[in-house]
Image (cartoon, helix red, strand yellow):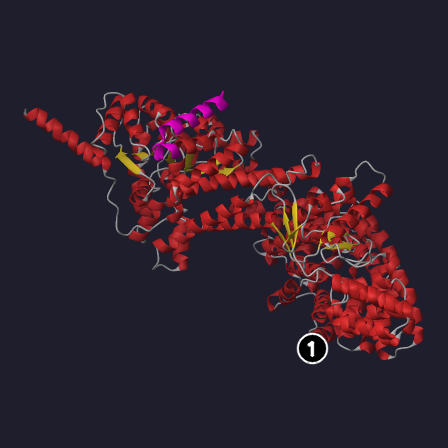
Amino acid sequence: MCCATNKFYAKLRVVQYAIDYPQLNDDLIQRPRLQAQLEACWSCRLTMVVAAAGYGKTTALAQWMQQTLGGDWLWYGLHSPTEADQLQRLLSSLTKARFPQINPINSLADLFDCWATLAPRRIALVFDDCQHLQASAWRLLNELARFAPTNLHLILSSRQLPQLDWAGLAARGQYRQLTAAELRFSQAELQELLPTQSPSQRQAAWQATNGWPAGLRLWRALPSGYQGTVSDFLAQDVLGQLPEAVRRTAQFAALLPFFNQAVLTAMAAPDPASLWHYNLFVLPDHAEWWRFEPFWLEVLRQQPLAEITQLLAQAATWFEQQGHLAAALDVWCRLGQWAQVAEQLKHHGLQLLAQHQPVLQWLQQLPATERQTAELLHLDGLALREHDPGLAAQTLAQAAQRYRAEQRYAEAFQVVGEQCLIYFWQGDEQALIAVARESFSLKSFVWYRQRRDLLKFPLLLFQIKRGRYIKALATAQSLAQSELPFFWRWVAACVVGGLYTILTLPNEGIQWLEVWLQHPQVQAEPAMRMSLLDLLATCLMSRAAPDDRIAAQDLADQASRLSERYGVRLTRLQTRGTKLGLALLEADRPTTERLIQQLLLPSDEPLPSIMRNRLLALRAFAWASLGEIKLAQHDATLSERGLIRDDALYGADPRMWLMLAQAWFCCGEYQRALAALERAKPLIEAAQSPILRLRAGLVQLASRWQLQPSPQLIAEATTIWRDYLSDGDRHMNATPLHLTTLLVELGLRTGIAPQRIAQFLAERDRAALEEICWKLYAEQPQQQAALLQLLGLYGSAASLERLQEVIKQASTQQRKIAQHSLTSIRQRPAYALKIQLFGSLQLWRGTELVDPNEWSREKARQLLALLVLQRPRIISREALIEHFWPDLTPQAADGALRVTLNALLHVLEPERSGGANSAFVLSEAAGLRLNPQAQIDTDYAEFQTLLQTAAKQRQQGAMPAALQAYQAALALYQDDLLSDIAYAEWVLDWREQALSQFVAATSDYLELLLAYGPTAEAIPYAERLLSYDPYHEPTYLRLIDIYHMLGNASAAERIRKRLERISL
């Protein structure tokens, strides 16, 4: 009797302990990020929390169980080896203790039946420290994962990877895994954990622990004795519990900079695979290589190994044979084999440096006597560049002297070029010139066989200084293709790219620069790559196509990121200038203002004078474009003085003087504008650039007109504008608005192509164009008819009254034109467009739904759909023809496009007169696009916005707002995108993308509904998702769970059978 009683109470204690999670400390911080990931366990069958000791697995689970509202839980912490029969008895005891009203349990099938009868209640079965489970117990858990009722959710935590068939569950979306990456503390959580410590102390804690929770708690408790405490904890609680073979394998691996199973096998490690099986603080390093966490590595290295020298020698030999030189060098340094280290660095150092290996660290470990060879001094200088550029330049100078002493002049010349690159990075103009002069000295390189090529560099500088750009281009190209050391060839290649921009030959420049960017040495050297990227962006910016400007922006961003990363001030400023030019082209005032403020900062000094003065010219031009006259005057004055001095030293760039001339014009300094153009004139003639000549001619014309208008200037304007229009230059939008306004006025006075000329100003300031038209109407009687037509195209309601006066007083012909213009202005739509793309395409003009019979051409509907999907981008006419008429000849396709566009405009604006511009579709030289200023609402754009809002709210933990946004977005998706345009190839990608977004959004919405919303509301969304994707297995499983929760077993069985049918 006494024995039975003791057994009864022992069993009772086990059950009581099992169903109560561990007591939590009061000083724990809340981790909503981690809790949200654990909360997702209710939407899958199996959740694994796998990490090494001290990652807070038990604490995280206990915190989650304390807060979860998704269902009931059963918890048990394992402390000793557990077999299947013990585990099954434990499951029965846990279930009976938590749910005493259930039927008797005599088998696993009875246990499943009991859990099923508890539906719709969801049960989370939580087992902690599952590394104690034996093989038979893992097999039992496999049975649970496969056959248990759908309301059971299994959550396991372990130090080791699970022995479960989780791949099948993962394929069905029923498996989640949390690892050390999710369990380690974030920087924000670290600040909450250590609120009283300074930022530097918190940073030290982070570096010591890498976010390891146990280490951070020990740091908080014993900051002064942290290292010893952590070592004791890991040595006793982890290392001391490992089998001998595993412990020795870990010690073998700790000798290496990184490791994998192959190298451990080569070292004859007892159990190479055990490090990953036991999850011993292993982190991915690179490719297929791994390393230990630093705190664990320190503990392992404290354990002595008698055969350490032999093991390291075996590892170094294996690394060298396999081509892993970096690892071999690390090991040789540990062995103190300096001769071997020096020999490998001599032969492979440059290659390793290009791979961003720690070459400097190996060199600094070498004895001083081993580092004095020319090759290692050269390598040392290159490795020092990012750490100490000044010392790097000195070291390279020593290397050059060594090479000269050994009469190795080619290598010495290469080293001097690398010195020049360092001074270029630093912007040290004087040092750069001094080293360059030395490199061109025949005394130093009298035996160098390419000395004739060297003498071409002074010739190149002379040609640029004299403005002989065509000859300079040929000289630079020959230098870039010579056999000179690569640095000097790269310098010549950059000069070629710069000359192409001066000569306004962007296509040739793009082709040249793209070839050079593919060179392996350019790709390995960031300073070289970023300069070429910036030049390529400048060439693309010179072309008119919108896609070219987008590509230019991307290249400028790449160059900017590289310059910021490597601290190359000159290239950073160059890329800022390029991005400022792009912002001016796009008439993006906010971006222009921001970039102007960043262009020249005190921290950018000192700068070479030539760069400072050219950037000042650009900034003066930008200030003038924004109408900031005083600021423009200040920068233009400084730049002009500097450019005059620089031109005498280095030669002039006509583009700088052209920008200065425009800045002076906007400041009202017309004489100074003409003086700047006079300085640019011989350079422009030397460049033989028609575009530069025309731009200079327009500025000169405007300046002379402001000083003294005359009929002779109108005759000159006629010639210049005719040439400008025939050239096709589209960069008038980069010209300051004040200058553009006067140029358009002069162009309209000539009477040639008034609509084309007016368009330059209409895109930027219609009110100014309208005012010019009325001004010239009063001054130019012979132009009145054309001006009235322009008012019809670009006029506003402000012109209605004056047009009515013209109708009363003008001649019959002008009266007809004025009446037509008046009608055009009145017919401009006062309504917005609303377009439905999900389902069949529907169009509303204001509140009026457009009758399908109004569409005279099916291609017109498709054109509208494509313009809406691509908004606000311009679609080139070539791309439209490729979409809609790929089989027609170019002439026939162009005619079809015009007819289709007219049909579309007739539907959008039925009362628009034939010659009037559309308020909704802009027809530009680059192609077609929807007017970004017009009010056009689409369900597709709203769908995208709502999905972004939902994702953002969910990330921030605002689940009700996320649910609301998801619901609104899914309501918009009435049917497939443009379902009535079923067979058009161009729409397929858009439709597939929208459907993928809908499926993902519905799945996310269902997950949130099951966790936070009314469960019953999820059924129609799940059924709808299955109608679009009948093979989406996770949705079937969620639907089964929902019906069980609602107590509808027959519906759950029906869904289960459907799932079985699609699985066959």
Above-or-below relation of 85 to 884: above
Quadrant position of residue 102: top left
Residue for point 87% across, 66% down: 816
The stretch drawn in magenta includes residue 1052: yes
Residue for point 78% across, 46% down: 900
Of 406 and 866, nearer the camera is 866
Of 763 and 896, nearer the camera is 896
Q: Amino acid at mark 1?
A: Lys
Which residue position holds label 1? Answer: 630
Residue for point 27% across, 32% down: 78
Q: Is residue 13 left or right of residue 222?
A: left
Tell me how many marks there are: 1
Q: Is residue 30 left or right of residue 1028?
A: left
The stretch drawn in magenta includes residue 204: no
Q: Is residue 451 left or right of residue 408?
A: right
Q: Is residue 256 left or right of residue 21?
A: right
Which span of residues is magenta-colored?
1042-1064
